[in-house]
Amino acid sequence: MRAIADQERATSLKARESWHILGIISEFIEATERLAEIRPAVSIFGGARVPPGHRWYETTVELARLLSDAGFAVVSGGGPGVMEAANRGAHAGKSPSVGLNIQLPMEQVGNGYQDISLDFRHFFARKVAFAKYATAFVALPGGFGTLDEVCEMLTMVQTGMGRRIPLILMDSAFWRGLIDWMRAQQLANGLVSEGDVELLQVVDDPAEVVKAIFDFYQTRGFVPTADEHDRMLYL
């Protein structure tokens, strides 16, 4: 009887895991179908706890509006704070405002400024969507999630697993300590190379962010090369 019960339980667990895998696949499929045509796009990250009226919020609105009017779709996490500001600025501009929402027990409530809205249950599927369709990455001040995204994008570019794109940190007063720590600890101890730290740009002015992106692509188009496209398949 125990053997039969154990076998039934194992079969039930395997069936549940199989359906879970299909759910993950469905997130990738939906993201591919709905985001494949939004390029060029800029992914913007930042804290969910930044309220409207705060300078980081208002800076993000301005940045997203400039990017949208310049022809870039703007992709955010779809929630409140800097994410809302990014969608808000883009929604008022000429290009799509995209929100990649995540189901969380706290903080994450979808904002109302999304032209394209996707819902994810899995962080890693959402991360792939952020990275795969981004022409550039911009991080405003934020918490652990923002740091996670910064390190994720930096690692992909550093290792060559992702295409080389502009990685921009906005608000030097907030980020300078992190850059200084990278140099004093990681670089000084041989854990990273000088060029790795230089992958990050620190910019304060929204117009300068837009200029930095255009300058980066001045000698090449926004469309990924065949080699870059192949690499992106393995994110």
Image (tube, rainbow, N blue to C red):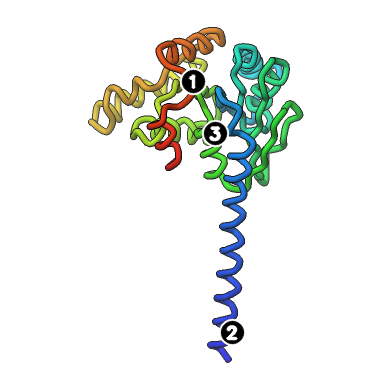
Q: CA distance from mark 2 to mark 3?
A: 44 Å
Q: Which residue is mark 3?
A: 130
In the image, 185 versus 84, the foreground residue is 84
How many numbered marks does the figure carry? 3
Q: Which residue is mark 2?
A: 5
In the figure, residue 100 lies in which quadrant? top right
Vertical placement of residue 127 versus 73, above or below: below
Q: Amino acid at mark 1?
A: Phe
Q: Earlier in the sequence, mark 2 or mark 3?
A: 2
Q: Earlier in the sequence, mark 1 or mark 2?
A: 2
Q: Which residue is mark 1?
A: 222
Q: Earlier in the sequence, mark 1 or mark 3?
A: 3
Q: CA distance from mark 1 to mark 2?
A: 57 Å
- Say whether marks 1 and 3 touch (CB < 8 Å): no
Residue 167 x/y as whole percent: 45, 22
SS of the residue at dot 2? helix
Residue 2 x/y as whole percent: 56, 88
Which residue is pictured at 56% across the width and 26% down the height?
43
Residue 181 x/y as whole percent: 36, 25
Which residue is pictured at 64% across the width and 36% down the height?
34
